[in-house]
Amino acid sequence: MDFVSCDVNVHIEIYCTYYAPIMLFNSNSHTDPNRPSLRILVVGLDGSGKTAFVECMEKGKKENVEPEPTACFGMTIVTIGDTQFDFWDVAGSESDRKDWENYVQQDTLVIVWVVDSTGSEARLQENSDALREFLSLEVTKDIPVLFVANKQDCKNALSPQEVLQKIKAKDIINNSRQYKTVGTEIPPGLRARKGIFQAYQYIKLLCS
């Protein structure tokens, strides 16, 4: 079967069946019609740690492994308690960002914006510009945002509040929607992760 561009406006879920090679699709927790399914969109610049964040949500105490960069997008189903989360992890390179709006559906409940806390001033400004453009779209109007200040365990990482300030998040949101902020650490190997459970709690809160 020939490869099809991601720049489409068709029902995105068809890729789960036909284009599995270009995406991450974890189905350890199968869809259960008796559980509420919450659609979460995970975006941010390339290299921010979006895929690692999503994998930590579903893998429990398994070893942290550096994931391959996301090609186009990935969808991971995570069941926690009585709730099923459908995490849509979308690639963040400059060429991919124009397609982000195609992944915002009517049932998208939360936008998770992942930021590399060790980014340079230029990279943080790029984050700010991308955030402003994305949240100005009509399709993202009123959708709550969880800001994830990732890589807090790395040298020279900014604190979550410093990250928010650098990307001008408060000015961009300007009381237009709910938002929360969490710092996360996803070190390699079996070292303890931090902030993942707090992120889960915030996501569930923002979904309500």
Image (cartoon, rainbow, N blue to C red):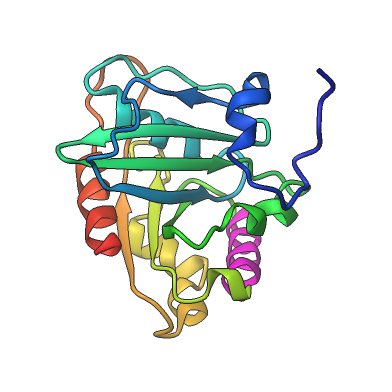
Is 113 within the magenta? Answer: no
Side (left or right) of 192 relative to 93:
left
Q: In this orientation, which residue lies closer to the viewer: 136 or 147?
A: 136
Q: Find the residue positioned furthest to the right.
A: 2
Q: In this orientation, which residue lies closer to the viewer: 12 or 139?
A: 12
Side (left or right) of 155 relative to 129:
left
- Span shown in magenta: 121-135
In the figure, residue 185 lies in which quadrant? top left
Give the percent coordinates (x, y) of residue 113: 47, 55
Q: Find the residue positioned furthest to the left.
A: 81
Which quadrant is the N terminus positioned in?
A: top right
Side (left or right) of 93 relative to 181:
right
| Callout count | 0
In the figure, residue 100 lies in which quadrant? bottom right
Q: Is residue 70 visible?
A: no
Q: Is residue 183 visible?
A: yes
Residue under the point 30% across and 23% down = 59
Is 123 within the magenta? Answer: yes
Residue 136, placed above or below residue 109: below
Q: In this orientation, which residue lies closer to the viewer: 52 or 20?
A: 20
Side (left or right) of 135 relative to 57:
right
Q: Main secondary structure of the magenta part?
A: helix
Give the percent coordinates (x, y) of residue 135: 56, 71
Q: Find the residue positioned furthest to the bottom.
A: 175
Residue under the point 64% across and 32% down = 15
Which quadrant is the C terminus positioned in?
A: bottom left
Q: In this orientation, which residue lies closer to the viewer: 173 or 72?
A: 72
Residue under the point 27% across and 47% down = 36
Give the percent coordinates (x, y) of residue 70: 61, 31
Residue under the point 46% across and 78% down = 173
